[in-house]
Image (cartoon, rainbow, N blue to C red):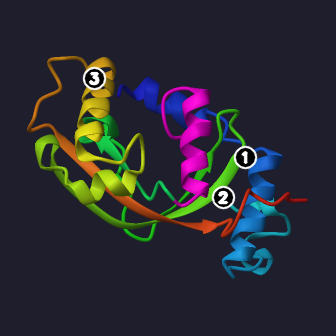
Amino acid sequence: MTDEQLHAADEQEPAVVDDGMSAFWQAARGHLGLGKFEVVVGGTPKDVVPPPSFSFGDSPALADELLGLVLAGRKRATATAWSEFGDERPPQVGDLSIVLDGAGTPSALIRTTRTETVPFDEVTDEFAAAEGEGDATLASWRVEHERYWRRVLGDEAFGPTMPVFCEWFEVVYPTEGPTPPVD
């Protein structure tokens, strides 16, 4: 980055966390027993930065479908082509993330429980089953993920030895049924 770009980046407004995200994070962290951090960081939930948020898939409909699998307990893992991280740090064991539905509403809090990076052609049956998509077989996983990554990354970036980041997770909030309303 040039000095001008660095200076412009320093002057940008900090990201604003909307009320829905703040309310979700307040309820989720209370559920986890983290309690309120008012004594340490301030008097409102907006003073506490929630963990990173994302939605599964590449469309609102797919985000809703995959979130449904997460909440039903069928989807307990996700795969990311290593190159998709760019300069970002991949999730680490213990990290929390907020999963959004297709409309961007926070709907689940997950915790990373295990990670490994393997070549595409070494992803296991166990991982494909944990990812829980389609018929949960490795054959189906390979067909669908190859199709997706060829479309997103390009044919030249995809190959059998392409590094795949395999992440297992657990849902820590909500623990049963749909996300409860938060006030």
Q: Nearer the viewer, residue 66 or 173?
A: 66
Of tags 3 and 2, the one toward the viewer is: 3
Is 71 within the magenta? yes
Inter-mark Cα distance, 3 to 2 = 31 Å
Q: In the rendered view of the protein, which quadrant contains the C terminus?
A: bottom right
Residue position marked by numbered label 2 in the rendering: 49
Amino acid type at mark 2 = Val
What is the x, y in percent for residue 151? 31, 18
Q: Nearer the viewer, residue 41 or 4?
A: 41
Q: In the rendered view of the protein, which quadrant contains the N terminus?
A: top left
The numbered mark, 1 or 3, whose residue comes first in the sequence reads 1
Amino acid type at mark 1 = Val
Is 176 within the magenta? no
**Secondary structure under the numbered disc 2 in the rendered image:** loop
What is the x, y in percent for residue 91? 39, 57
* Disc sitting over residue 153 in the figure: 3
Residue at x 28% of width, y 27% of height: 149
Inter-mark Cα distance, 1 to 3 = 30 Å
**Secondary structure under the numbered disc 1 in the rendered image:** loop
Q: Is residue 56 above or below residue 123?
A: above
Q: Which portion, as a residue range, is magenta?
A: 52-73
Q: Quadrant of residue 77?
A: bottom left
Residue at x 65% of width, y 34% of height: 102
Contact (Cβ within 8 Å) of mark 2 with mark 1: yes
Amino acid type at mark 3 = Leu
Contact (Cβ within 8 Å) of mark 3 with mark 2: no
* Disc sitting over residue 17 in the figure: 1
Inter-mark Cα distance, 2 to 1 = 8 Å
Taking the view exactly as shown, the residue that stands out farthest to the right is 183
